[in-house]
Image (cartoon, helix red, strand yellow):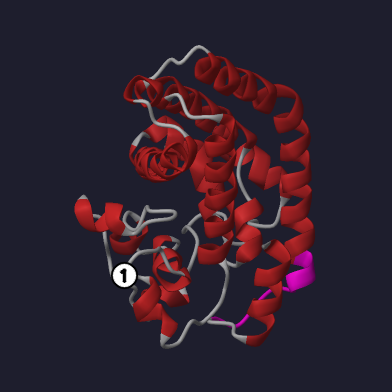
Amino acid sequence: MLALMLLVESFFPARPWRVSRVKRLGFHGLVALLNQILMRFIFVPPLMWLATTVHAREWGIGPALGASGWVDVIVTLVLFDFFDYWMHRWNHNVPLLWRFHRTHHYDTHVDVTTTLRFHILEFAASTVFKASWILIWGPSMLAFVVFEIAITFYAMFHHANIRLGPLENIIRWVHMTPRLHAAHHTVAVRTRDNNYSTIFLWWDHMFGTFAEADDEDLKTLGLTEGRNSDLSLKWFWSAPVKLGP
């Protein structure tokens, strides 16, 4: 999906690049590599163990209702995307969580590589959240893996710097689009504190956090601080500690 979106961005960009795409891919790729090394050894194994154990012991609402097979997969996808909406919203509204999530928002030009840009401590927090989701619903390993793949693919799609043209109004009936998610990355708070959905756009409509993208606002992405250091590893890792809330 990363390779596909990089290719599509080359032919249908929504915004001009002000920084080398190679430099952006190199920086965000390095961040992702470091994160993945830590994730594989620290966060993923206990989460997989928990998912396997919970489902095997038939804990959670899903097993209690007899959900299995594709019913389990579909409900897990929708339910966990709903939970993800709230986790994302809390990442903006809870000061401690925002300290780490804002490193994702420091990027002054949003494209598919921005999907790789997350602080490792945000992954730690998301692991705790996902553990609670697993305990609540009790999905099968297949259902949980399908959700993880889907949310990763959709995040790469709506972060991509692509212009959808006529498809924009069709896709947004159900899903988050790159234009709407770019609005979530503006300096302007009006749009930045809206459009939290990852897969299904329903949640923003349902909970009053949908905001239409504004062409003028879309010209300035990122945050007001650190605009000259968004591709600095030192700034990226230390900003949550050094900066105020």
Image quadrant holding the N terminus, namely bottom right
Residue drawn at x 51%, y 82% as measured from the top left: 163
Picture layout, residue 86 above or below residue 199: above
Q: Looking at the image, which residue is at 40% across and 22% down?
A: 63
Label 1 residue SS: loop
Q: Is residue 46 above or below residue 81?
A: above
Question: Dot 1 corresponds to which residue?
Answer: 173
Quarter holding the C terminus? top left
Q: Viewer-proximal residue, 141 or 27?
A: 141
Mark 1: which amino acid? Trp
Q: Quadrant of residue 191?
A: bottom left
Q: Is residue 122 above or below residue 226?
A: above
Q: Check if residue 19 falls in the magenta segment.
A: yes
- Which residue is found at the position 55% from the left and 16% from the top? 56
Q: Residue 12 at what x, y percent from top left?
A: 60, 85
**Which is more toward the observer, 94 or 226?**
94
- Position of 220 relative to 30 (above/below): below
Is 178 on the left or on the right of 227, as rendered? left
Residue found at x 43% / y 22% = 132
Percent x, y for residue 49?
63, 18
Q: In x, y percent, where is residue 76?
A: 43, 38
In the image, is 209 to the left or to the right of 222? left
Q: In the rendered structure, which segment of residues is drawn in magenta?
A: 15-23
Can see residue 140?
A: yes
Residue 227 highlighted magenta (yes or no): no
Q: Main secondary structure of the magenta part?
A: loop
Image spot of residue 183 (x, y percent)? 39, 67
Q: Quadrant of residue 188?
A: bottom left
Residue in front for this viewpoint, 157 or 21: 157
Is residue 244 in view from this perspective?
Answer: no
